[in-house]
Amino acid sequence: MNANPMAVSSDPKSIAISSIHHMASGSRADFDAVIAPHGFTRTRLAAPPSVRGDGPGGFHDLALWLRATFEGLSYEIHHAVADGDLVTVNSTMSGRHTGPFTPYTEDGELDAVFPPTGKTFAITQSHWFRMDNGLIAEHWANRDDLGMAKQLGWVPSTPAYLIRMARAKRRALRTIGGKR
């Protein structure tokens, strides 16, 4: 089901699958072809405020944030099902943790910083899409975040890694001018 991941047709399943592959390696123009101007992803609430935009630009900014954290980001598609204006895709996301991972609270405050471990991961995800006029209007996902955290060595955390996290968060807060 991964053949030619950048090809986009008008089939809702193909559009959804293409958008997932675009997260790993797509350009802004690739997102323009599959995301509605008003399209949004619910997963943006854990991302930095600077990448929480709507439309193709918002999705592209989110993709760049993920790529800066996970080298070799890729998705293997297992199943895709469409029912009316809804499409669901079951996939495995994988990559190597080579940049700081910086989740934020819904209020836009830096939550934590996970310094790079250099470890690889592969986790299952279910992506849901609501389509509007042949484009993605809404996206949300169920991810195995705990599985990723275990594979990357975030949990259980060693005392040394907790110290690295605290230092990385202090540096990040100084960079963004946030509170301690």
Image (spheres, rainbow, N blue to C red):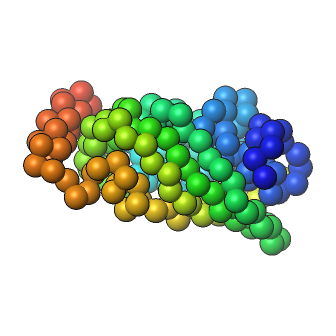
* Residue 156 % position (x, y): 22, 58
Where does the image place residue 55, in percent across and percent down from the top left? 64, 43
Position of 57 relative to 139 (above/below):
above
Which quarter of the figure has residue 18? top right
In the image, what residue occupies the spot 19% across and 53% down? 157
Horizontal side of residue 141 vs 173, given as left or right:
right
Residue at 80% from the left image edge and 67% from the top image edge: 82
Residue 23 image point, x, y percent = 61, 40
Residue at 63%, 33% in the rendered image:
25
Q: Is residue 79 above or below residue 5?
A: below
Q: Answer with left or right where residue 169 lies relative to residue 85.
A: left
Of 93 and 167, which appears nearest the observer? 93
Q: Is residue 166 visible?
A: no
Which residue does the image show at 65% across and 62% down from the upper left?
90
Left or right of 36 on screen, residue 57? left
Q: How many marks?
A: 0
Spot occupied by residue 12 in the image (x, y as percentages of width and height)? 82, 57
Any part of residue 47 in sight: yes
Front residue of 90/28: it is: 90
Of all residues, the one furthest to the bottom in this rendering is 83
Query: Splitting the image into 4 quarters, where does residue 81 fall?
Result: bottom right
Hey, which quadrant is residue 31 in on the image? top right
Q: Nearer the viewer, residue 173 or 19?
A: 19
Q: Quadrant of the C terminus?
A: top left
